Amino acid sequence: MPILGHPRSWSCQWLPLLLLLLLNTSHEPGVEGVTHYKAGDPVILYVNKVGPYHNPQETYHYYQLPVCCPEKIRHKSLSLGEVLDGDRMAESLYEIRFRENMEKRILCHMQLSSAQVEQLRQAIEELYYFEFVVDDLPLRGFVGYMEESGFLPHSHKIGLWTHLDFHLEFHGDRIIFANVSVRDVKPHSLDGLRPDEFLGLTHTYSVRWSETSVEHRSDRRRGDDGFFPRTLEIHWLSIINSMVLVFLLVGFVAVILMRVLRNDLARYNLDEETTSAGSGDDFDQGDNGWKIIHTDVFRFPPYRGLLCAVLGVGAQFLALGTGIIVMALLGMFNVHHHGAINSAAILLYALTCCISGYVSSRFYRQIGGERWVWNIILTTSLFSVPFFLTWSVVNSVHWANGSTQALPATTILLLLTVWLLVGFPLTVIGGIFGKNNANPFDAPCRTKNIAREIPPQPWYKSTLIHMTVGGFLPFSAISVELYYIFATVWGREQYTLYGILFFVFAILLSVGACISIALTYFQLSGEDYRWWWRSVLSVGSTGLFIFLYSVFYYARRSNMSGTVQTVEFFGYSLLTGYIFFLMLGTISFFSSLKFIRYIYVNLKMD
């Protein structure tokens, strides 16, 4: 075949198809795919998943419970975003026809063993909810009913909902809204069953149609069914807190620090003019502060390859985060479902790999790096390897527990193909461009061959103190907003304030840059020229504070429990902190580098 006979032809044929596949995965329930019906047309209802209400990432297939199930299960073809979100839709036994009401229709008769009854009891005690999908609209409800009352005597009652009422609203020939309820229905008691006894159940359902004046689904809030909390409102406390902190920090850097710098530059340049008339054999004699280390401040750091890899991957995630927020602002996502964002994040990560390769290789070449191939390998594996290890553990736990969050083999192969055909090649291509377009480092000061001895530093100028200050202040700027983000990702809230999120993201970067400049100045004033790694660690430590906050959120702000949810929460929270370390460390480093170049360019040298 001609495609297989020419590698370039194969790449050109399959790469666009692969990207098109990922782009088509942004279709999410409730946004597109509206079907037009005629009166009496069948409306397919898909069963999807069940799981504990307080563990959003612990989901199982609906048919894993002893419920009414067809003899042959037929699954629906899903998008990548839906698979990543744990969806596993399958056809159900419910027969619904457009605009035809039904009352007390029998779904099936069942005889449950004591083991099956115990499985249902355990699911109800853990507040299992189910999710159905009809015409891309989700319907959610609890599996059963539990009642705790009294102390002496104590009452513990568990019941199963055996009748469901479906309420669907239509406009013309389209379904606009769907809901399921158990109002005016008594649960079937699951108490008092003997071990050798079977429980007979009859599952029924009703369907009621009503016409609505709403023409589009987007005109009606999906939170109207009341099952999940409504969309979060604007939280002015977070905005005011962040703005005040930014103004204080920017004012501190712009007014206090620049005045000190102006005095330093005036004094140092005056000293230089005075000493130039004298003997001046020793340039450093009588100097102190950051001027005296001008021959060492641009001395390249150890582990320069790792430093460049951190900067490259950090720049990539800065572009990735900005791109996700901008896409959300442009309305490209269904804000009530996480699948579309997952798909977009995968696509953007693959496409922005060229940024990591370019930034890393370019700076590596500027600071005299020679092992270019090793730098590319380190850059491409700096995030992908920790992510793969974390995902392997989390996915194995899901797989061992039968959760639908465990990715199928086909999805794993697709993601691996995306990385091999898009991500890794773009990293190499970006690295080649970066290496070839690298300009000389062009330091304002000449570096001596012998490093200057660093005087003993006070405790408040240690790396630990700088990391504490540099990490806590940016974290405090986003701490309130961070709660709402966690409540969305790890809870049942619905986040739609992407404009506020973009504003807070810009504040975070601004605070990080200001803190980095201030801490770098204090470090150089103590005649300590080892600022390269210190600048990355100082503000990058915000990622550690974010992880510590995740521990607090899990223990005090959520009701999550169980091995599956706990492993996923802490695994991906650790990765989140690592991503913030890379992003803010990159911002911090380049801010410090720009600042140091500025002060030494304006310093008169012999």
Image (cartoon, grey):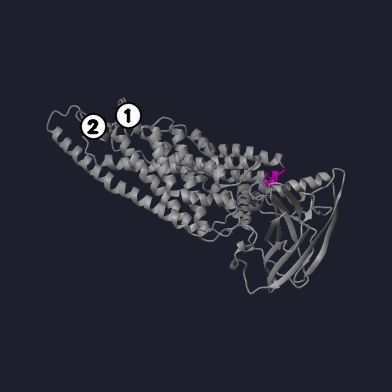
Determine which of the numbered discs, if any, sits on residue 245 in the image: none
Which amino acid is tagged 1?
Answer: Gln
Q: Nearer the viewer, residue 406 or 115?
A: 115
Q: Nearer the viewer, residue 99 or 193?
A: 193
Quarter of the figure with residue 209: bottom right
Viewer-nearest of discs 1 and 2: 1
Density class for disc 2 (Cα within 10 Å; few <14, some 14-19, many ≥20) is: few
* Position in image of residue 210 (x %, y %): 70, 72
Which amino acid is tagged 2?
Answer: Asn
* Position in image of residue 336 (x %, y %): 59, 58
Compared across the picture, whether 95 is left or right of 578 comes to: right
At x 81%, y 48%, the residue is 192
Are dots 1 and 2 in contact, CB under 8 Å? no
Q: Nearer the viewer, residue 103 or 533?
A: 103
Examine the rendered structure and indicate whether residue 551 appears above or below residue 65: above
Compared across the picture, whether 491 is left or right of 125 comes to: left
The boundaries of the magenta stretch are: 402-410
Quote the CA–CA distance across marks 1 and 2.
14 Å
Examine the rendered structure and indicate whether residue 14 appears above or below residue 103: above
Determine which of the numbered discs, if any, sits on residue 457 in the image: 1
* Position in image of residue 139 (x %, y %): 69, 60
- Residue 325 in the magenta stretch? The answer is no
From the image, tell me which residue sits under label 2: 288
Q: How many marks?
A: 2
| Residue 366 seen anywhere in this rendered image of the structure | no
User: What kind of element bears circle 2?
Assistant: loop
